[in-house]
Amino acid sequence: MKITPIERINQPSITEFCNKFVIPDKPVILTGVANEWKACEQWTPETFKSMFGDVIAPLRASDDEIEVFFGGLAEKKLISIADYIDSILSETQDGHKRLYLGNIPFDSPIAKAHLDKIRPDFEFPNYFPDNTGNDLRLWIGGANQKSTIHNDNYHNLNAQIFGEKTFLLFAPEEYQKLYATKMDDELWSSPIDPQKPNLSKYPLFDDVTGLEAVLAPGDILFIPAFWWHQARSITPSINVNMWVYTHKICEIWEQHPVLSGNMANVVS
Ligand SMILES: O=C(O)CCC(=O)C(=O)O
């Protein structure tokens, strides 16, 4: 695996961002934008404990997504937000996995009433002139939480609010080296853990090239649609992201009503 650091850009205009990054599908870290948000000034794990501590939520049974997708841990577990926040702020013991409060839609029927209280604390700029719809999500996890390498069929702005998180990014055309398999009609995911890849089982992964984005509070990562990515938290971490649908993505989707993993052929 050959990884190089991603580019950073400070406070681009809408036109500059669009021309340099959205149109050519180029990942970048945006700085100087989210730093202004109330979320970045005020949100900590303790904020969530004091505001929502009594709420009982169904969370992912492991914060290692390979275990959820490939290891039979798909069932959710109920926990209070207070207990969950305590768990992500304490050390894990060997063999003991944390749960994961990730991928929570701000407008889901269960979460909306709670998350509406913090929704005014951030606002992503609209860098996408042909935007046809957005989906906002919340991600709160402990150190070493990690996703699989997967891709999404929409653009993504992922903002680091608290703590540090690192993303590995691979261009769509790298898909054969990732051994991604179909999880459902919208999701393809790789069984490879890039921090400890099994190269005798997945030899092509050795040749993959990618980018690394290390996010600190106030950084926003742009992941273009169909780019493969893995998220891994370095410390307890809070992120919000906005998935963005655009006319261009919808057109590709309509012309090729196949699956996002296969879309790598189409967009490369
Ligand atoms: O932070 C995570 O666990 C995954 C984030 C992700 O995959 C995304 O923003 O698309």
Image (cartoon, rainbow, N blue to C red):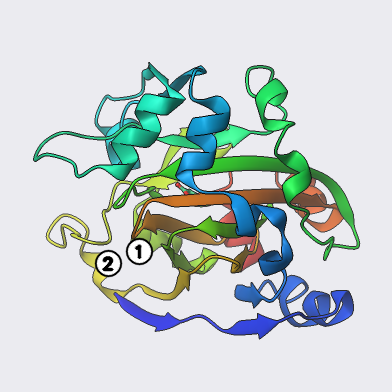
* Amino acid type, mark 2: Leu
Question: What element does badge 1 sit on?
Answer: helix
The circle drawn on residue 204 is 2
Regarding residue 184, the answer to whether it shows in the image is no
Q: Nearer the viewer, residue 52 or 244?
A: 52
Q: Residue at x 69, y 83 (%)?
A: 10
Report crowding for label 2: few under 14, some 14 to 19, many 20 or more residues within 10 A (C-alpha): some
Asked if residue 195 lies left or right of residue 267, the reply is: left
Residue 131 falls in which quadrant of the image?
A: bottom right
Report crowding for label 1: few under 14, some 14 to 19, many 20 or more residues within 10 A (C-alpha): some
Asked if residue 70 lies left or right of residue 160, the reply is: left
- Report how far apart the C-alphas of labels 1 and 2 lie in the structure: 5 Å
Location of the N terminus by quadrant is bottom left
Q: Residue at x 69, y 17 (%)?
A: 109
Regarding residue 144, the answer to whether it shows in the image is yes
Question: What element does badge 2 sit on?
Answer: helix
Q: Are marks 1 and 2 in contact (CB under 8 Å)?
A: yes
* Amino acid type, mark 1: Lys
What percent of the width, then of the height, locates residue 50? 52, 31
Q: Residue at x 75, y 51 (%)?
A: 244
Q: Nearer the viewer, residue 121 or 182?
A: 121
Q: Is residue 224 above or below residue 137?
A: below
Identify the mark nearer the N-term, 1 or 2: 1
Q: Is residue 107 above or below residue 153?
A: above
Location of the C terminus by quadrant is bottom right
What percent of the width, then of the height, locates residue 261? 52, 49
Asked if residue 59 lies left or right of residue 226, the reply is: left
What residue sits right under mark 1 in the picture?
177
- Does ligand 1 reach within 8 Å of label 2's beta carbon? no
Q: Residue at x 44, y 82 (%)?
A: 5
Asked if residue 55 lies left or right of residue 203, the reply is: right
